[in-house]
Image: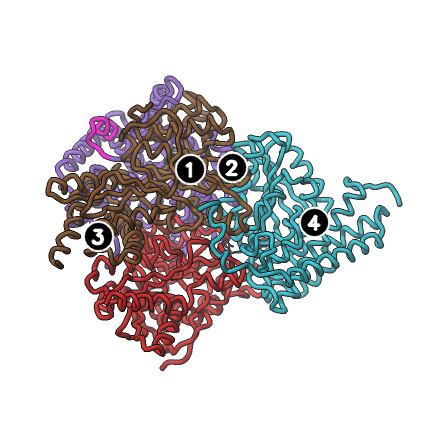
Chain colours: A purple, B cyan, C brown, D red
Amino acid sequence: MSDNPFPVDKAGLLEAYRMMKTIREFEERLHIDFAKGDIPGFVHLYAGEEAVATGIMMHLNDRDRIASTHRGHGHCISKGVDVHGMMAEIYGKETGSCLGRGGSMHIADLSKGMMGANGILGAGAPLICGAGLAAKFRGDGGVGITFFGDGAANQGMVLESMNLAAVWNLPVIFVCENNGYAEATSRDYGTAVKSYVDRGAGFGIPGVHADGTDFFAVYEVVGELIKRAREGGGPALLECEVIRFFGHFEGDAQTYKAKGENEYNRANRDCLKIFRAKVTEAGVISDAELDAIDGEVAELIEDSVASAKAAPLPSPKDLMSNVYVSY
Amino acid sequence: MSDNPFPVDKAGLLEAYRMMKTIREFEERLHIDFAKGDIPGFVHLYAGEEAVATGIMMHLNDRDRIASTHRGHGHCISKGVDVHGMMAEIYGKETGSCLGRGGSMHIADLSKGMMGANGILGAGAPLICGAGLAAKFRGDGGVGITFFGDGAANQGMVLESMNLAAVWNLPVIFVCENNGYAEATSRDYGTAVKSYVDRGAGFGIPGVHADGTDFFAVYEVVGELIKRAREGGGPALLECEVIRFFGHFEGDAQTYKAKGENEYNRANRDCLKIFRAKVTEAGVISDAELDAIDGEVAELIEDSVASAKAAPLPSPKDLMSNVYVSY
Amino acid sequence: MARKLSYKMAVNEALDLEMTRDPTVILMGEDIVGGAGSPGEDDAWGGVLGVTKGLFAKHGARVMDTPLSESAYIGAAIGAAACGMRPVAELMFIDFIGCCFDEIFNQAAKFRYMFGGKAETPVVIRAMIGAGYRAAAQHSQMLTPIVTHIPGLKVVCPSNAYDVKGLLIQSIRDNDPVIFCEHKNLYAHEVDVPLESYAIPFGEAAIPREGRDATIVTYGLMVHRSLEAAEKLAREGVDVEVIDLRTLSPMDWDTVIESVEKTGRLIAVDEAHPRCSIASDITAFVAQHAFRALKSAPQMVTAPHSPVPFSPTLEDIYIPSAETIAGAVKKTIIQKMVAA
Amino acid sequence: MARKLSYKMAVNEALDLEMTRDPTVILMGEDIVGGAGSPGEDDAWGGVLGVTKGLFAKHGARVMDTPLSESAYIGAAIGAAACGMRPVAELMFIDFIGCCFDEIFNQAAKFRYMFGGKAETPVVIRAMIGAGYRAAAQHSQMLTPIVTHIPGLKVVCPSNAYDVKGLLIQSIRDNDPVIFCEHKNLYAHEVDVPLESYAIPFGEAAIPREGRDATIVTYGLMVHRSLEAAEKLAREGVDVEVIDLRTLSPMDWDTVIESVEKTGRLIAVDEAHPRCSIASDITAFVAQHAFRALKSAPQMVTAPHSPVPFSPTLEDIYIPSAETIAGAVKKTIIQKMVAA
Ligand SMILES: Cc1ncc(C[n+]2csc(CCOP(=O)(O)OP(=O)(O)O)c2C)c(N)n1
Ligand SMILES: Cc1ncc(C[n+]2csc(CCOP(=O)(O)OP(=O)(O)O)c2C)c(N)n1
Ligand SMILES: [Mg+2]
Ligand SMILES: [Mg+2]
């Protein structure tokens, strides 16, 4: 094995790969099981965007917080939320991360710094300002990251939050996951400006781009921003261009996409393939090592599905539990 | 009299002066009468900012629409809302523009294209997009102008609206009246970026500055933007730097201002004095002509107060009228 | 001429008819065209559940996709209405009202009054309501009590395709702002609907079932659960009248009071949360205005005071069932027997 | 040790005490410092009506002015609460709730339930409510029914300085999101308030006046109008009990029911609009749960179904008066006589 040319040591690279693969496997499996009718509700898959969540989360620990979106599985997994709990949650079971009360769109685990997927577009941006504020008062060096899509980037609360974060100089990174579509609407229709990064200047925060299919591109760029934020340098805006492999939600026929678009992207812009090629070509990690992870991940996901299916449903008597802390 | 070096003919200049003076006199009088206890409610005076409303409204006709703010008297007067009706409205009388139902913060006259002062900061921005959309569907060449302060510039709905206007290519101008304060809070605290104009780029619309104490500066800059909008060129953002001569609202002790700030501004940055100096120095209009207008305006305002005071109160039996068109 | 039409297609048909009739009617919403600017089909979606499908093909630029900016485009619809258009804006789920509430309750609702009767704001805001879709806490709410509380708004909640068509046409023609609530779990429900255009006036409740023993007052999906309950009870010899309010603001109090005066018993059924709900509104009004007619304590059946749970097992018991409703009806009857 | 303290200064004192006691308590709002970044006094205002004056001088950076961005800073308060702080955010007027409603009703209110009990969101949102300030339709609303409707929120509306202090302290210590409503027309009202710190538990109504003939249930400013009405009626020989709910969510139903069971008559008084109001909520609950105790039709006294008018003549009749309340009480009594 040759010298490691990457900014992450081998253990870290393996961890990053495992994260990405876990997300991918989780999503591919949901896609199949949803089609079978096993899974209720709205399910938005993150497959294709794994390098963003992973490239960012590799810099974070439990003290750091994230506020996610409706397309939150990838953020959850990479932030350390238990995969079994997540799968059970999506199946609506009592063993779910949120006791089956939230479902796919509301997975949270505050002990891991995961403040919740969110059914309301853009709602995470104000919340993460609060997380940043709390970190600032505690002086613990924690940062907050919020995610929003190219569509949600046009929500007023996201825009307001950038100004607030700048005014209060909060350790917060605004991450726009630009996958080119908001539901069926093209990003080019819904947003008048070519690059979201251009908005940073209007709020007095730096804005940077990253190719969201390249783990290393994301990792390096966001690393700078996070470091700056931890040191009191304030908020920043990061736009990652990514690919959504599946439809907007499961059940979407995707006729708004170009013919062959998904196939092309799967073949040429798959962040997992790109990662594998880089680390194996550099001779830092072997295909066999990655294949071994693939196997372990497949088992993990299989096991999570099996246990989710076997898990008990919430009890009707608990319908009204947890509306309040105590009532 | 010498050649007219201004972009407005003499009649226009006299009209502009009359507008500005009417606003000033209206406001100075309200200031006195509020202090006497004659006027109920929250009253936000526009005095000092007249050149902005006037410089813009000189380009408009009744087909064009404006959506105003809590500090709306100047916009109303220059858009042609009847001064007697306005004064009576502020006194809460049945003869008021809104039958006394709205008061200072809610004066509207849709027949004049004045869509309302607004007690909610930033709320005019979405509304004016609607006006622009209506003009576009009608193809009547009408434009919409919305105003917001340096504080309200940070409202999400203002920011969202810029993107929407750009996406739909609406004939709408967003005018930020930057008077340096949002209530008692300095503009420099509440907004992280030096210039609001920098936000335009983030929404794909041109942004320009104007010295809001100079009628001609405003008139020329906005003229370009309005022409462009009428011709289908789309929205724009204009920031006008202005002075608020009085407190945030009547009753404000203004201790957040610098010592001598108001006096300095009154002496050196009064848009009416600046206008007078320019037009008299150019020899286009004489002091006597302007003094004559002053006299007429003083009479108009005096008369509006007298008739407002004499006007009948709304009848209790009409408390529930006009909640719906028909109910 | 009538034919079976679904609730969903009745929305589509009403929009189509009014757009054809009146050029000032325009539609806007997120993905109501559904594909704007994208490389594939421009109108791939026609709304997230296909409700507006086909309208773009027919009416072109008058059907507009919007950016993800509820404040901006709902506000724009309101502004355009104040300028002479008749916009129908779709707020995909009523749960998103928090992103544009000011424009609805402080602007649209108040213009006319605040401006001394000098404004008209003929805007319609269509929104999906209701639970049962496994869509969890932020995509399953009713929120009908919140909009009903606000003076200046009209609130419409049809229970079937016939009413959808007539009430949506009326909503578009109405000169006040209307919140038009579409229950997503009724979209597939079909009834006979005439081909031609017709408007159903606001403030006129329907009585889908007459009865002598008790009055159920309700709206939306709960009309069907109540009718089910009534059928069950009929088999047990209890003859229940069911009132479908159709519009929550204005309310047809006359029909409600008249019915309670006849039956002497009230059951108010609401899929919304209990506090300050439509159920409490009805019950309180009847208690004040028809107190002497009441033979027994009025009963309220509502969803619980909790967010909507995701898990299907919980969501199913969250939504009031025909059984629960029947139970409440029985309570009004047994009470009377006890008292008698 | 007690001394006279105004409602307004009781807010200030409660905030001061809790900030002193608990370093995680932080304040934020527009101009609550009031002068940030300006060339003159940094804390010139201390809130638009001076409620938070002095707290910045004492607690420094823990009292923060905000940009004019309600969604952002109210959301930030909620986010900070979910991360272990105890923020008290001021929404200057509750009328501005339309600019941050999502963060309140879809985020703060639902976190705990949606996340399976794994979140705590100890945020307090203080807001001015109520009419009478000549502040017109967008600065005079109650909106208490709207927040009360939402499960997951607690809603507090004190009527006097003693309750303000104890309830605000409780609100800050409470682990759920609390909407703390301050009636702007009570700010100058004074009562005896102890110097020391104390908390008043939620869900415990007060009975500022006991009586045998009828029960008025109300809150906020209307407590005073109701007491006035009760005094008037006492002179006419009618003995009225007045219940001050203090918290609208949770509600002290026990006290309400117990009183109605004693008096047999209910008058629900609410400064909010009538539809789906606190008045209808109370009336409906009593009608369902204490029907047999009611000797006559319960009466509701509310503001009308219209926006708040600006003109003082209209605003004065808009707000329910002691006379109107007394009239409603008499209605409950006369009815009984007629029936008897
Ligand atoms: C406030 C709000 N408005 C609308 C929606 C409906 N909605 C859910 S996802 C979505 C598109 C989101 O697009 P984008 O932000 O680009 O994220 P992506 O789905 O592409 O990851 C829409 C319109 C919502 N959930 N919340
Ligand atoms: C949504 C909303 N938030 C807060 C307020 C209270 N408020 C009224 S005016 C004002 C300051 C406005 O500052 P700016 O936008 O600069 O306008 P200016 O008063 O300076 O003209 C504030 C905070 C409001 N009316 N509406
Ligand atoms: Mg997207
Ligand atoms: Mg300002």
Q: Secondary structure at mark 2?
A: helix
Eye-nearest disc, 2 or 3: 3
Q: Amino acid at mark 2?
A: Asn
User: Label 2 vs label 3: CA separation?
Assistant: 57 Å
Same chain? Circles 1 and 2: no
Residue C171 disc label: 1
Q: Secondary structure at mark 1?
A: helix
**Is B71 above or below relative to C237?**
below
Name the chain under label 3. Answer: C
User: Label 4 vs label 1: CA separation?
Assistant: 43 Å
Name the residue tied to disc 4: B51
Q: Nearer the viewer, residue A53 or C28?
A: C28
Look at the image and tell me in which quarter the N terminus of chain D lies.
bottom left
Name the residue tied to disc 3: C264
Look at the image and tell me in which quarter the C terminus of chain D lies.
bottom left
Instruction: Identify the residue at image location x=20%, y=37%.
Output: A91
Residue B42 is left or right of residue B302, and the answer is left
Q: Residues within 10 Å of mark 1 (few under 14, many from 20)?
A: many
Note whether residue A196 is visible: yes
Name the spot of residue A265 as percent of width and height, x first.
37, 22
Name the chain under label 2. Answer: B
Same chain? Circles 3 and 4: no
User: Label 3 vs label 4: CA separation?
Assistant: 68 Å
Name the spot of residue A7 as percent of width and height, x first.
38, 36
Name the chain under label 1. Answer: C
Q: Secondary structure at mark 4?
A: helix
Name the residue tied to disc 2: B163
Q: Nearer the viewer, residue A78 or D224?
A: D224
Span highlighted in magenta in the image? A30-40
Q: Amino acid at mark 3?
A: Gly
